[in-house]
């Protein structure tokens, strides 16, 4: 789901802004863009976001609104820079990638540039300083996603209602369709036998077998059960995208079976309409966590 959240706070004597953006993605994917003073907390930040977000492409960017007030000097680890450069060139060669390894890329890597405090030690932010900002930005993001989710849930509910209405149409038509099939079978038998005596018992057996083959009662019951499960999932506050995806597959399975047994214009039209609604339902699920 799409969303945006931002927050700012005091870190290392400066003013830090953190922005979190999410866009639709089938799975969970993170991308962090942090200043080097925050390189040491990338791991905890990734884990924190993974706890509150379950799906989507997540981009986190942090920048200084006011630079950190740290007394010290910037130190360059040339050996680390050489290692990064050599590794990047080897990767480019082995994978036959395009592009150049520039200064900006090398400087962004961990431990290449560090600020050494007066008196020793690198000037890096502590997780305890940054986590409140991350949490506020994440909460703002979740609030926005929640508003979008409510709209999306309403759209999915309308699709479920359309499916339910079509299923009711099929259920009402099913007995009439069965009577029509029986009438057609008897007429066909009469034409084939040209008025000759027919074994009524054998005919009754064939009619029963035919009725069993075209009966869609079980499919309609399972369809109704799956629709109820979808509604129950939408009523919860949990992440239900994957669950609804599975239920959507099961709904399509039942609709296809009904269509294969239909042999009736009214039911066939209802099945086509249901397939269209299910396609829209499953498309919307790509946007749902």
Image (tube, grey):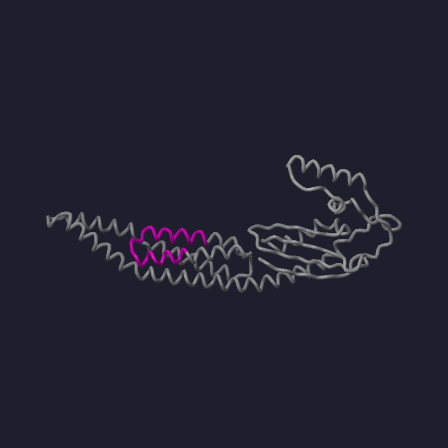
Image quadrant where one finds the C terminus: bottom right
Direction from residue 80 to residue 224 in the image, left or right? left
Which residue lies at the image location 74% right of the left edge and 44% below the top edge?
102
Residue 261 x, y percent position in the rendering: 31, 51
Q: Nearer the viewer, residue 49 or 84?
A: 84
Residue 267 forms part of the magenta stretch: yes
Q: Residue at x 39, y 55 (%)?
A: 222
Which residues are drawn in magenta? 248-275
Residue 104: % across, % down: 75, 47
Image spot of residue 24 (x, y percent): 57, 55
Q: Residue furthest front?
A: 99
Q: Residue at the spot x=60%, y=55% of the render?
A: 23
| Residue nearest the observer in this picture, 91 or 11 | 91
Can residue 142 be found in the magenta stretch?
A: no
| Residue 201 position in % (x across, y down) | 17, 49
Vertical side of 50 occupied by 161: above or below: below
Above or below, 34 against 156 in this view is: above
Judged left or right of residue 35, residue 281 is left
Which quarter of the rendering shows the N terminus?
A: bottom right
Specify whether 46 is left or right of 184: right
Q: Residue furthest right?
A: 119
């Amino acid at each position: 789901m799409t969303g945006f959240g931002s927050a700012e706070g005091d870190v290392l004597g400066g003013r830090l802004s953190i922005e979190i953006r999410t866009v639709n993605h089938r799975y969970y994917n993170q991308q962090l863009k942090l200043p080097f003073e925050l390189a040491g907390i990338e791991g905890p930040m990734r884990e924190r976001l993974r706890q509150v977000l379950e799906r989507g492409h997540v981009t986190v960017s942090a920048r200084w609104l006011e630079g950190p007030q740290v007394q010290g000097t910037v130190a360059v680890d040339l050996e680390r820079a050489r290692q990064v450069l050599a590794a990047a060139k080897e990767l480019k060669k082995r994978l036959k990638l395009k592009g150049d390894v520039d200064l900006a890329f090398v400087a962004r890597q961990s431990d290449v540039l560090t600020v050494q405090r007066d008196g020793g030690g690198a000037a890096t932010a502590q997780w305890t300083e940054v986590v409140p900002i991350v949490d506020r930005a994440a909460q703002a993001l979740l609030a926005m996603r929640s508003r979008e989710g409510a709209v999306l849930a309403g759209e999915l509910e309308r699709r479920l209602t359309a499916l339910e209405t079509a299923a009711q149409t099929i259920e009402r038509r099913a007995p009439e369709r069965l009577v029509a099939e029986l009438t057609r079978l008897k007429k066909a038998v009469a034409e084939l036998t040209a008025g000759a005596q027919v074994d009524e018992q054998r005919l009754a057996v064939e009619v029963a077998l035919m009725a069993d083959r075209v009966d869609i009662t079980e499919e309609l019951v399972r369809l109704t059960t799956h629709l109820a499960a979808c509604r129950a999932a939408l009523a919860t506050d949990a992440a239900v995208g994957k669950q609804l995806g599975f239920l959507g597959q099961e709904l399509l399975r039942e609709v296809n079976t009904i269509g294969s047994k239909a042999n009736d214009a009214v039911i066939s039209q209802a099945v086509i309409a249901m397939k269209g609604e299910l396609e829209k339902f499953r498309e919307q699920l790509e946007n749902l966590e």
